[in-house]
Amino acid sequence: MLRILKALVVLALLAFLGLVAFAYLGDLSPMRSDVSQPVELNVGQ
């Protein structure tokens, strides 16, 4: 039982380290694109 618990702790630690590494090294920047839409002001006045 202790072996299984140790293995789970090691796997959880590796998963956490992988998540931290991805957060620092992965490309998490948002994709940018220009959006333009014509606006009509004072329509019907």
Image: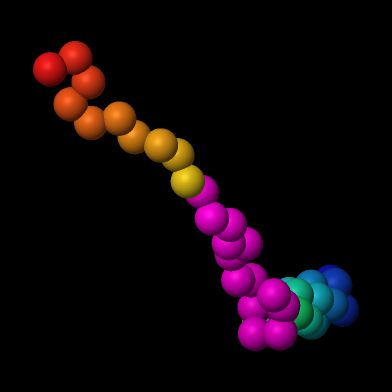
Say whether residue 1 is left or right of residue 34: right
Magenta residues: mostly which secondary structure?
loop
Asked if 8 appears above or below 40 in the picture, the reply is below
User: Which residue lies at the image location 54% right of the left edge and 55% below the top edge?
Assistant: 34
Front position in the image: 20 or 4? 20
Could one spot residue 19 in this view of the protein?
no
Could one spot residue 34 in this view of the protein?
yes
Front position in the image: 16 or 45? 45
The outermost residue toward the left is 45
Q: Please check the rendered image and state whether residue 27 is part of the magenta-colored stretch, yes or no.
A: yes
Say whether residue 35 is left or right of residue 19: left
User: Which residue lies at the image location 12% right of the left edge and 17% below the top edge?
Assistant: 45
User: Which residue lies at the image location 45% right of the left edge and 39% below the top edge?
Assistant: 37
State which region is magenta.
21-35
User: Quarter holding the N terminus?
Assistant: bottom right
Residue 3: x %, y % from top left? 87, 78
Residue 7 quadrant: bottom right
Front position in the image: 14 or 27? 27
